[in-house]
Every structure is written in structure tokens, then in C-alpha cells.
Image (cartoon, rainbow, N blue to C red):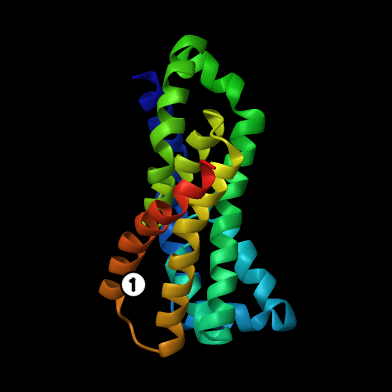
Amino acid sequence: MRLLVIALVLGVALCLPFVFWGGQFTEWFTGESAIAWIRGWGAWGWLAVIALLMADLFLPIPATAVMSAAGFVYGPLVGGLLSATGSFAAGLTGYGLCRGFGRAFAVRLAGEKELTEHTALFQRSGAWLVAASRWLPLLPEVVSCLAGLTRMPFRTFATALACGAVPMGFVFAGIGASGHARPGLALGLSILVPPVLWLAVRPFLRR
């Protein structure tokens, strides 16, 4: 139960930037504004895309809009690679920070015994949540932080994270590159593909 409290605390903390600055960031990094922002960095635009998607861990960045803009500017392959890299790096950052520095906070809030019990549960089934949550707002950051707090094995976390981040990055970059807004198609693929990928690669982690 207390692990749920930790999740709620993380969710509230991550929601606050959306409450105060969400509208402004959406205006800055959606559609033509996002494309102009990326192009404004010139030869460093590719790095700006990755950095912006990593900043989504702390700021109300419209990540899918940035991925679409990256696809428009760089094409579906390069734009997809940049988008997937940025999303993957954001998840790793949340995981690493919470694993390295958040354990003491979690123990004070939940207690060592209960946190240990939930750690085993999250390590067994949490990878599904890591893989399937990337398409949702806020939840990916919360899940990455919980994975770090509960010390999910790095290889398991990174593999599940890739299963979610890679298809999402390429799907939305492809939408942007095509010049057509098909949010239903992108959303459907982002929901369905990550669990299927995780199902396919999970047996290899057990060897």
C-alpha cells in the first residue's frame, strides 16, 4: 500500500510543472513551432531533440509532438532513431537517479520491510508496465522512478524500456515525416507493439 503512496507522491511532483507551464510548453513545442525550434539549432538540432525528450522527465514537454517534428525534419529513420534515443535516455535517467539517490526517501516513506516485499513483486511483473507505459502521459516517468527505487535489474529494465521507447519513437517520427496527422494509428501501434516485443525478448533474458 505504501508503494502506492510513493507512486502518488512521484505523480504529484511530476504533475506540478504541467499545471504551471504545460500550456506554454505545448505552444512552444507543437507543430510548426517545434520544427522551427529544431531547425534553429542548425547542425546541433539532432542533439537538441534528444535533450528535449530527456527533459520530459522534469518538464511538461509534449514528447510525441517533438518526435513528430523530428520525423518531419530528419525523416522517418533518423528522426525515429533520435526520438527513440531521447525517450530511452529519459527512462534511464529517471531509473538511475532514483536507484542511486531515492532509496533512503522510499525507505522513510514506506519502511524497509514493505519496500522489500514490493520490490520482489515489482521486479517480477514491473517490466510489463515499463514496456507498455511509454505512450501514456506522466506514467512512464513514475514507472521508471519506481523501477529504480525497487532496484529492478538493469538489464531487465533497459530491455523493457527499449521495447516501449523504440516503436514509439519510430511510429511518431514516421507520422511526422509523412506529413499526415494520424494520432489513432500512432496511439494504437504504441500501445500494442511494446508488450508484443517484450513478450518476444523476455525468454532471452532468462538464459
Q: Would residue 137 be seen by someone viewing this image from the given angle?
A: no
Q: Secondary structure at mark 1?
A: helix
Residue drawn at the location 31% of the way across and 61% of the way down: 192
Give the camera-side residue of 149 and 197.
197
Quarter of the view holding residue 207: top right
Residue at the extreme right of the image, as rendered:
43
Query: Label 1 neighbourhood size at 10 Å, few (<14), some (14-19), many (20+)?
Result: many
| Nearest the eye: 67 or 114 | 114
**Camera sees residue 199:** yes
Q: Is residue 165 above or below residue 181?
A: above
Image coordinates of residue 134 in percent, x first then y, are 42, 55
Query: Which residue is rendered at x = 32% and y = 60% of the image?
Result: 191
Q: Position of residue 165 (x, y in %)?
A: 49, 60
Q: Is 54 on the left or on the right of 114, as rendered?
A: right
- What kind of residue is marked 1? Ala
Pick the quarter of the image with the N terminus.
top left
Left or right side of 185 for 163: right
Query: Residue 36 location, x and y as percent?
Result: 56, 83
**Residue occupying the point 43% across, 27% down:** 6
Say which residue label 1 marks: 186
The picture places residue 200, in percent across and down from the top left corner, at 41, 56
Tally the numbered discs.
1
Residue positioned 66% across, 75% down in the render: 46
Is 196 or 48 nearer to us in this picture? 196
